[in-house]
Structure formats: structure tokens, C-alpha cells
Image: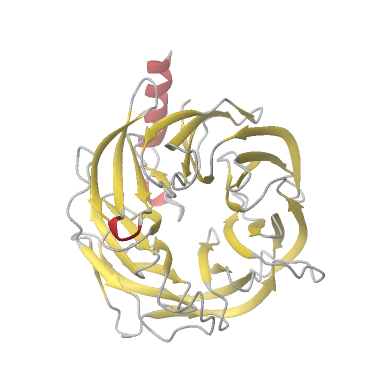
Amino acid sequence: MNNLRRFCSLIIVLSAPLALLSARGGFAASSAITYRAYVGTYTAKTNSKGIYEFAFDSAMGKMSAIEVAAETADPSWVVVHPNGKFLYAVNETGNASTVSAFAIEANSEKLTLLNQVPAQGEDPCHLSFDRTGKFLLVANYTSGTVAAFPILADGTLGEHTGIQQDSGTLGPNKERQEAPHAHFVTPSEDNRSVYVSDLGLDRVMVYKFDAGKGALSATNDSAGQAAELEPGSGPRRMVFSSDRTYMYVLGELKSTVTVFAVKNQERFAAIQSVPMLPRVFSGRNDAAEIAIHPSGKFLYASNRGHDSIVVYSINPKRGTLKKIADIATRGKEPRHFAIDPSGKFLLAENQLSDTIVEFRIDPATGKLTPTGEMISVPSPVCVTFLPLQ
């Protein structure tokens, strides 16, 4: 049965065009019902052993008990390759940071380490694939660098082929914006550029990308600044509308979402900035994750401190946002959340509560309702899905 499930999984994945890769670095859509979910965690000062896995039924919203998929240090971001055979993880361990390549075992979906390579920077926090699936892009937070690594035929990572250092005017927050901090990297639609949200610079940077060589280089604009946010915003994550006409950037430090109209591949114009917090809230907050529902109608973003998921409707003509609701995540520090590929459920990872809490998504309103499903995972900070059937 496992072999049959695995065969079906690979047929689904291999038939999906690589052009449908999402900025998240995984699968844009799937007709699968059952998935294997992989969970990235922090292992330092926790009882986590590394990467965990559980089965997810997208028809019923059922999550199985967790198991250890692989023991590895601080795998705070994980992505599954579009061919369904490999998983890649950052190892966010300071100046000894690495990126790990794993083979996904055909029968058990457990992970076998293939190799590790230096991250070419400190504290990598995000991974994505280029549009061909031949290169892995890495954002290194502490050093403010982005690097590209070739993915070899056996799934191992080769020597890096490109690296760029973010630079520019620092933001006004002296504690958090004391240096460039690359927090997210994603390729452009034509695969000729990569975008990097830099928390320290209040900018989305753009670099040229050579998809044949995996090389990164500066644009004609030496500053390479595709989009500018309000000073002190601290851009952390970003997401594009399905038609790529709008870009939404989450500001971690000011708890905002800024909407940009896409002028061309290298230039964006800000048209709106919306708050993520209620007016009456005055406590500490760090905004964390952002995602658009597969329908394209709703945008979700998470708050750490307020411990909530805020829901916005997206104006289909203007791309602007209107707040619908904010929903408590029933835990502390939702560093990440994931919308399952069916679009029916949202899984909120509460890092400091060691839980993943499930919510049902209303397809008409976008609102979230807790289903009662919850699993315990030590320090969960990332979830990604692999279709099984």
C-alpha cells in the first residue's frame, strides 16, 4: 500500500509544471487527498530532535500523531522539492549555519541525510526553488546575504553558484535594524530575478538571476531596491497575487501589511499599508507569516504577542485589503502557519506552546473556525506538505 501511495504521489508531482512553484518553495496546487506534512523546529534550548512528520487528511482535516523524520540541528525552514523525492532544510546555527539535503524514503516518508553545505551566511531562515527546480535559494538573516546552490541529480547540493550581500540605508530601529537582514527570497515569474525582503533596510531588494549558471548579480540600479517600505517597518515575508499584479509585504516591526502594485519586474509602487493589530492592543508584537488563500480572495497574516491570525479580503480590481477578523491561535507565538493545499484548513504553529492548531476556512468569507484538532510538536516553526495520493 505504501508503495502504491508513493507511486501515485510521484505521478502527481512529476506531472505538475515547475512553473507552478509558489513563492513558498513547494506545490502550488494538488488533487491529492492525503499528505505527509513535515515540520521544521528549533532544537536549541528545547526538547526537539529536528524535523517531524505527520499524516494529514485534507478531506476530513485529520492530523496523525507526530514522528521524528530526521534528527538535525535547528531546521527552522523546510521545503519539499517538486519531484517529491527530496527535502531541504536550513540549519540556523549562527556562524556554523548549513543547509541540509535529505532523500525522502519511498516507503516510510522518513528522511535520509544526503549532504550538508555551508549556508554562505549566518542564520539562514528561508529557502525557495528557482522556477526550474534546479537551484535552491537561501536567505541568511544575520549576515544579510542570499545565495544559490545547484541541486544535483541525486538530490545533493553542490557548491554555491551565486551570492549577494544586501546593502543600503539602515532603518531607524537601532536594536533590530543595526545591519541588513535578509528574511525571505523568491524568484521572479520569468526566473531572471530574485526578490529579497530585508528587515534591516526596509526594502525589498532585487538581483539578477542567471538560471543557466545559478549566478546572482546586481541590477542596473546599483542599489537594487525594488520596493521601499515605511521606515521601521522591518519587512519579513512577502507574497504575490496569483496574477502577479500585486505584492504584499509583511512588516514584522510595525505589524503592517503593505500592498504594492507591480510596475515591472524590478519596480513596485506602494498603494496601501494596513495594520495587523486592533487599535486597543498596546503590548509587544512581532508580525510573522503571510499567505494568500488558493482562491485568491483572502490574505492571512500572523501576530506573535497578540497571538492571532488576521484575515483580510482582497479587492479583486484594486488589490487592496479590508480586514475581516482576527482569530486567536489558541497558543503562544504563531511564528508560522500553513494553508493546506486543498484550501480547506489552516494550521497555526504556536512555537512557545509546542502545538499545531487546526482551523477550518470558510470558502465564502475567509473566516477561521477551530476544528478541535491539535497535535503537540516541540517548538514548531514551519510546515510543508508532500502529496501521497
In front of the other: 384 or 97: 97
Residue 373, by quadrant, is top right
* Residue at the image position 18 percent from the left and 50 percent from the top: 158
Specify the farthest residue to the top.
1
Image height of 50 relative to 306, above or below: above
Is residue 116 shown left or right of residue 72?
Answer: left
In front of the other: 314 or 152: 152
Image quadrant where one finds the N terminus: top left
Image height of 264 relative to 239, above or below: below
Residue 86, by quadrant, is top left
Is residue 284 shown left or right of residue 73?
Answer: right
* Residue 344 visible, this angle: no
Is residue 162 shown left or right of residue 13?
Answer: left
- Residue 130, given in percent of the width and then of the height, sits at 33, 56
Is residue 82 shown left or right of residue 276?
Answer: left
In front of the other: 253 or 299: 253
* Residue 183 visible, this angle: yes
Image height of 363 relative to 70, above or below: below
- Residue 94, given in percent of the width and then of the height, sits at 35, 59
- Residue 212, given in percent of the width and then of the height, sits at 20, 59
